[in-house]
Image (cartoon, helix red, strand yellow):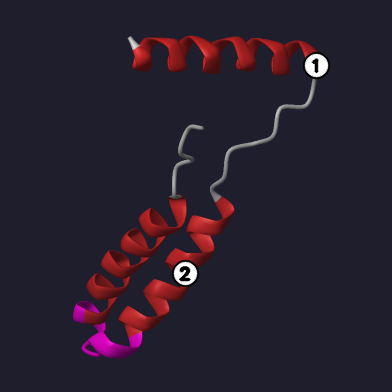
Amino acid sequence: MTSKPKYAGLGIAIGAVLGAIAGVLAGNIGAWLAIGVAVGILIGMSIRRRAVECPECAAIHRTHEIARQLRRES
């Protein structure tokens, strides 16, 4: 089984950085950092891998996953 990427953590980190920058500029780091983290959570939840829609694409993706697993095992 392969691990799926975790974009929520990346979104939180980006939001925290943007919130800290906005906080320094506005002079109220605590409030803006909290807002930045909230926005980061939303960004992280919106960035996801899209599901495969057509059967031909699904077959190609399965063969790629099998090839990756074989390369990892050898």
Magenta stretch, main secondary structure class:
helix
Q: Is residue 69 left or right of residue 61?
A: left
Q: Residue at x 45, y 38 (%)?
A: 3
Number of residue marks: 2
Counting from the top left corner in percent of width and height, residue 42 is at: 53, 64
Cα gap from disc 2 to disc 1, whole angstroms: 35 Å
Q: Is residue 5 left or right of residue 52?
A: left
> Image quadrant of residue 21?
bottom left
Q: Residue at x 21, y 88 (%)?
A: 27
Point out which mark residue 39 bears: 2
Q: Is residue 27 magenta?
A: yes
Q: Which residues are magenta?
A: 24-31
List the residue tagged with mark 1.
Answer: 55
Report the amino acid beneath label 1.
Pro
Report the amino acid beneath label 2.
Val
24 shown above or below 21: below
Q: Is residue 62 magenta?
A: no
Counting from the top left corner in percent of width and height, residue 37 is at: 39, 73
> Image quadrant of residue 35?
bottom left
Q: Residue at x 31, y 79 (%)?
A: 33
Judged by depth in the image, the label closer to the viewer, 2 or 1, is 1
The secondary structure type at the circle numbered 2 is helix
Mark closer to the chain start, 2 or 1: 2
